[in-house]
Image (cartoon, rainbow, N blue to C red):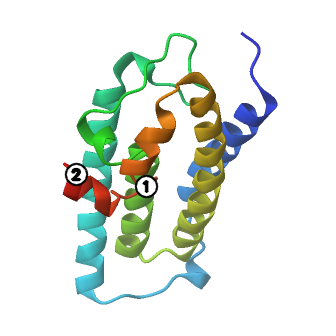
Amino acid sequence: MKRNPKDLFFVGTQLLLFVAYLFRIVKIDFAVPYSLQLAGIIFSVAGIIISFAALFALNRNLSPFPTPKPSAELIQSGIYKYIRHPIYSGILFFTYGYSLYSENTLRLLIFFLLLILFRFKAAYEENLLQVKFSDYSTYKKTTGMFLPAMKAFFHG
């Protein structure tokens, strides 16, 4: 199957940012109080839990590319009942938390770049999902993109 150039751009950029996240530039690192490092660990663990919950819920629908698989189903249960892009959320929680814990400025910068990338990637993906699934617009009204929408808590 030939991939859409936008799919390749988003996944390629994401991969480059993940590789860059492995490095540090000591001269620009910052120091944070122990309490913020502890908060960073909590954010990181939450990110891992969110990501695994999303992976488990997606099962065979999982793809690194924003374009849904031809056989994809719209998942609206589990963590997807509250968040439309929980894998992105989990990655963001982890990268933010671990950048605090490790006191690494480069990692913190990459977190912000991933946030921007995921915002555009998610918007692109949502346009494709709306074309594929007629009830996607309704689903969007009760869920948040990266964090639960307040409506989700009240409409349970």
Quadrant of the image occupied by residue 52: top left
Nearest to the observer: residue 6 or residue 38: 6
Dot 2 surroundings within 10 Å: few (below 14), some, or many (20 or more)?
Answer: few
**Where is 36 relative to 119, above or below?**
below
Secondary structure under badge 1?
A: loop
Earlier in the chain: of badge 1 and badge 2, it is 1
Nearest to the observer: residue 148 or residue 64: 148
**Where is 148 relative to 74, above or below?**
below
* Separation of marks 1 and 2 at Cα, in angstroms: 18 Å
> Which is in the foreground here, disc 1 or disc 2?
2
Residue identifier under label 2: 155
Quadrant of the image occupied by residue 101: bottom left
Q: Is residue 21 left or right of residue 117?
A: left
Secondary structure under badge 2?
A: helix
Residue identifier under label 1: 146
Q: Which mark is residue 135?
A: none
Kindly tell me whether residue 52 is visible in this rendering.
no
**Where is 110 relative to 84, above or below?**
below
Residue positioned 45% across, 45% down in the render: 140
Nearest to the observer: residue 75 or residue 92: 75
Q: Position of residue 97 (x, y in %)?
A: 36, 67
Q: Position of residue 119 (x, y in %)?
A: 60, 55
Dot 1 surroundings within 10 Å: few (below 14), some, or many (20 or more)?
Answer: many
Q: Is residue 126 left or right of residue 95?
A: right
Residue positioned 66% across, 52% down in the render: 120
Q: Amino acid at mark 1?
A: Phe
